[in-house]
Amino acid sequence: EDQVTQSPEALRLQEGESSSLNCSYTVSGLRGLFWYRQDPGKGPEFLFTLYSAGEEKEKERLKATLTKKESFLHITAPKPEDSATYLCAILFSGGYNKLIFGAGTRLAVHP
Amino acid sequence: DTGVSQDPRHKITKRGQNVTFRCDPISEHNRLYWYRQTLGQGPEFLTYFQNEAQLEKSRLLSDRFSAERPKGSFSTLEIQRTEQGDSAMYLCASSFPSTGGDEKLFFGSGTQLSVL
């Protein structure tokens, strides 16, 4: 049973073309939702943590939002250096301290 | 903050051989995690240490896998009698509890294992 589902699997954007990535989750008792960025051959790099519905976090061209069933990562005016895989992960009650990851969205931004 | 260090970066082995990976967490981080990632998938939880105690182990982890964290510092992950299905990136992460209770994980660059 998938607990974290990310869409789309892959996204190709032109530089400056804003878009959103989706992360939906099915667990109850969410303790936190995390966004990570992963470059090829490297480990995931932390971006944001969201704890409750309605919360928003921003960093440069990225903004993460959270509802009761999903999170969005909005990318405004992306640049080629934003190309990476973006991973969503959750912590939930009863899940101890282990993160459950989605499969990720592979983002390619072309000049 | 020198980051989480993993060694080796790459390992090629023949089926049936044993392999061992090492992870050095960020100093003063008392929590350490091992994850496995295959191509096109997100990281999958393997096991978790708080200091030297192994507090949780994935049910998906076979008896061929063992992890240790002596003295609560570095950790090793050993895979015995490797199989081709063990080929993956093995990621280590560490963290320190935040005041909010849910801390962020810092990941190493991983060890890429190829079993021939």
Image: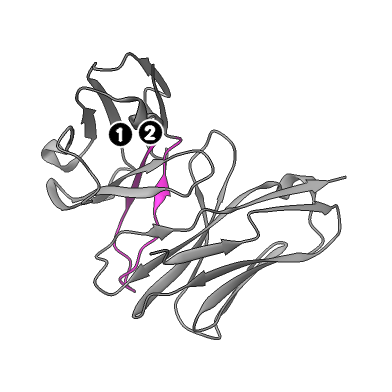
Q: Give how far apart the Cα atoms at labels 2 and 1 are.
A: 6 Å
Image quarter where the C terminus of chain A lies is top right
Q: Chain of mark 2?
A: B
Type of residue at label 2? Answer: Ser
Counting from the top left corner in percent of width and height, residue B21 is at 29, 27
- Residue visible at 21% across and 29% down? B78
Q: Say what secondary structure mark 1 lies in.
A: strand
Q: Magenta residues, as a range?
A: B90-109
Spot occupied by residue A27 in the image (x, y as percentages of width and height): 38, 75
Q: Position of residue A1 (x, y in %)?
A: 38, 64
Identify the disc placed on residue B5: 2
The amino acid type of the residue labelled 1 equals Cys
The quarter of the displayed image where residue A56 is located: bottom right
Q: Determine contact: label 2, label 1, CB under 8 Å.
A: yes
Viewer-closest of B94 and A41: A41
- Tag on residue B23? 1
Q: Position of residue A91 (x, y in %)?
A: 36, 67
Q: How crowded is the residue under tag 1: few (<14 C-alpha within 10 Å), some, or many (20+)? A: many
Relative side of B36 to B67, left or right: right
Task: Name the secondary structure under disc 2.
Answer: strand
Which label was assigned to residue B97? none
